Amino acid sequence: MSMNLVFAVNPIIETGGQIAAIIICLFLLIFVLITLGFHLLMTVAMTWVREKSELVKKVRPLVESANETTDVVKRGVKPAVTENVIVRRVAEVPLQVQAVDKRVDQISDRVAKTTIEIRARTIQAQTIVKAFFMPGLFKRPAPVADKDGLEFNSPGYQRLMEQQSAEIPAATEPGEGYARAVSASQLKDVPTH
């Protein structure tokens, strides 16, 4: 006895399934084409990068030669005529920069000295004119003298004397330490070693 099974299939669902299968196959085809295109693009890009890296490897000896020649030139030896023209030019750049820097320093020193000299001469001329033509306006400061009659006009000396005149501690007896203070005026007659 054999049984035949018959499935009842709705024709709308069957048609929808066939349409869905066709759409899935189209999406799969598009995905495969996009993936293939991406792989081709990456292959071309990697080939280009490999070629450029080979160019960089070819430039490296030239850069090393330029560095060595620059070091030799910095020591004062001129580059060899047999060197590559680019290497010689690159090696001469530090010497030219040093020469320009030295020249700039010389000129700026000359300008600074000239400016100072002009300003000093101007002040000198103004002072002479004031002293000669207007002696009443030109007043000399009164000299500062200490009690011994010595004149010290330096503000730095005056400030130093004020600081030194502060009391200095001194020992009265051996072993007591600093028991009393001695002023700077009391140290006047102390012999020095």
Image (spheres, grey):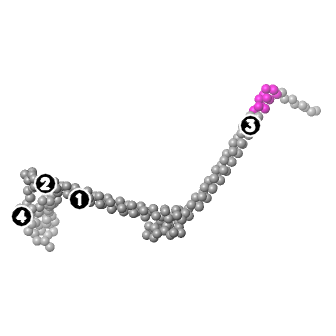
What's under tag 2, amino acid-wise? Val
Q: Which residue is mark 4?
A: 148
Q: Earlier in the sequence, mark 2 or mark 4?
A: 2
**Of discs 1 and 3, which sits in the foreground?**
1
Q: Secondary structure at mark 4?
A: loop
Q: What's the distance in space between the residues labelled 2 and 1, CA to CA? A: 18 Å
| Image location of residue 96, percent across then percent down | 42, 62
Q: What's the distance in space between the residues labelled 1 and 3, CA to CA? A: 92 Å
| Image location of residue 16, percent across then percent down | 77, 29
Q: Secondary structure at mark 2?
A: helix
Q: Around disc 1, counting alpha carbons within 10 Å, would you say few (fewer than 14), some (14 to 19), or many (20 or more)? A: few
What's under tag 1, amino acid-wise? Glu
Q: Which residue is mark 3?
A: 26
Viewer can see residue 165: no
Viewer can see residue 173: yes
Q: Is residue 17 left or right of residue 78?
A: right
Which image quadrant is residue 56 in?
A: bottom right
**Of discs 2 and 4, which sits in the foreground?**
2
63 falls in the magenta region: no
- Disc 4, disc 3: CB below 8 Å? no
Q: Around disc 2, counting alpha carbons within 10 Å, would you say few (fewer than 14), some (14 to 19), or many (20 or more)? A: few
Q: Earlier in the sequence, mark 1 or mark 3?
A: 3
Q: Is residue 149 left or right of residue 18?
A: left
Give the quarter of the figure containing the N terminus.
top right
